[in-house]
Amino acid sequence: MSGNLYTSIALGLYFGAMLLIGYLAYLRTSDHEGYMLAGRGLPPWVAALSAGASDMSGWLIMGLPGAIYTTGLIEGWIAVGLLIGAYLNWRLVAPRLRAYTEISRNSITLPSFFENRLRDRSRLLRSLSSIVILVFFTLYASSGMVAGGKFFESAFGGDYLTGMLLVVLVTLAYTLFGGFLGASLTDVVQGLMMVVALIVVPVVAIQTIGGTGETAAIITEVGAGNLSLIGAGQMTAGAAVLVILSGLAWGLGYFGQPHIIVRFMALRSPQEAASARRIGTTWQFLSLSGAVASGLIGIAYFNRFGAAPADAETVVLLMSQVLLHPLVAGFVLASVLAAIMSTLSSQLIVCSSALVEDIYRAIRKPVPSQRTLIVLGRTGVLAVAIIAALLAVSPNDTILGLVAFAWAGFGAAFGPIVLLSLYWRKLTNAGAIAGMVVGSATVFGWKALDTGLYELLPAFVLAMASCVAVSLATYRQNDEIEREFSQASLAVGARA
């Protein structure tokens, strides 16, 4: 049996499993809240693995190992920043957001929570939030489609456009019908596949090279700074500081990622966030460690056994095809698709909620039927997917570059508002709008300056400062807001 046949069998089983899960979720989805938030009934382990899988898109198995392979361990600060950020997100945001969104008029999306929390009657905050989501998630979803196209080019020597469209169509199939529950349940399977692949490939590669000592020696021989967290060789001290700060700044992005924190809102209770945090952080540590190790080990492997890959972001794919039995390699390749599709499905659901829940329902009176809302939600998923696919037809950036920009956009636009909404009584509607506008604008402006410092860091700081300054200038006590704030504090056992 040929290697391609084994790979096709593995991918066929994977696609079939995803479609089956989507169908089963479809049978359990009967109303709009169920389609968008699974009825707030996710167990901790589902929420944890779903949040991790939807977070770590194709960049985990392609983008991050490619950056490590190209630059060395100094790019590992991205992994450090993400691990710290993910832990703090579960610790600080998850329990309180789960409680507060239900207390504040049962908000089922992030924009609706902002509006309800701050009693914005103008609908401006909700509308701006929805626009930010649609802009950055269309770019983010496009990065996943680019990863899908690159995957098929590398794995099969196939056509980029054909591979990209296949990934989009299968993801659309289970997302359109299964909704949030379908995306979450497929995320669990996909998350497990990803972490296993990122453990198996580097372990087998080290054994093939001759052990950890030999592997480390080759990596150092290829580049003196490859195993240094502070860089070496031609990198100046100033450049190294920028790379380290930029890497750590990735962690700030977690507080504002709608497709991740919506999993917090879907937990069965605020108290279950603690067990979800332990599961999610463990998964995150193993996955990020495997991604970093794969990039480093790839340096040694290709130096000893073959020419460097034409595209550094395919290093894990190439090693798996050479080192593993074709059927096992097929499942590793399927795990790459899992990384891509898990994030893509989550992004499409959030975009759909922005279109239907935060734009259409905000202006449409009376409220349409549940059946109409579900149909509109599916239409929104399809529309965003088509636009993102058109952008992915001719990509002009790396997978990591596309993800980094969208991650910064959400982190700066929403992160400060989420934290202040949950922990500061005096945040005002005007303050939130100011922070969102300043954060989004700074991401675009700083990116254009090309300073070498990741745009998320200055954008987050300026957005936070804007939120606080404008809120202090416009604050007026509202007894209803005060009561809700205290109720949310008590619901998670915190001091009001």
Image (cartoon, rainbow, N blue to C red):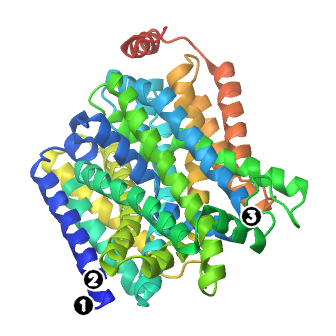
Residue ID for mark 1: 1
**Cα distance between the residues tagged 3 and 2:** 35 Å
Q: Residues within 10 Å of mark 3 (few under 14, many from 20)?
A: many
Q: Residues within 10 Å of mark 1 (few under 14, many from 20)?
A: few
For the residues bearing labels 1 and 2, Cβ distance under 8 angstroms: yes
Residue ID for mark 3: 226
For the residues bearing labels 1 and 3, Cβ distance under 8 angstroms: no
Q: Amino acid at mark 3?
A: Asn
Q: Amino acid at mark 1?
A: Met
The residue under the point 26% across, 87% down is 5
Is 385 left, or right, of 473 in this rendering?
left
Residue ID for mark 2: 6
> Could you say whether the residue bearing mark 2 is in a helix, strand or loop?
helix
For the residues bearing labels 3 and 2, Cβ distance under 8 angstroms: no
Residue 110 versus residue 148 in the image, above or below: above
- Camera sees residue 67: no
Q: Nearer the viewer, residue 107 or 175?
A: 175
Residue 177 versus residue 469 in the image, above or below: below
Q: Amino acid at mark 2?
A: Tyr
> Could you say whether the residue bearing mark 3 is in a helix, strand or loop?
loop
Is 92 left, or right, of 97 in this rendering?
right
Front disc: 1 or 2: 1
The dot on residue 375 is none
Q: Nearer the viewer, residue 128 or 414?
A: 414
> Could you say whether the residue bearing mark 1 is in a helix, strand or loop?
loop
1 or 2: tag closer to the N-terminus: 1
Q: Can you tell which quarter of the image residue 83 is in?
A: top right
Q: Nearer the viewer, residue 267 or 470?
A: 267
Q: Position of residue 9 (x, y in %)?
A: 23, 79
Q: Position of residue 159 (x, y in %)?
A: 42, 90
1 or 3: tag closer to the N-terminus: 1
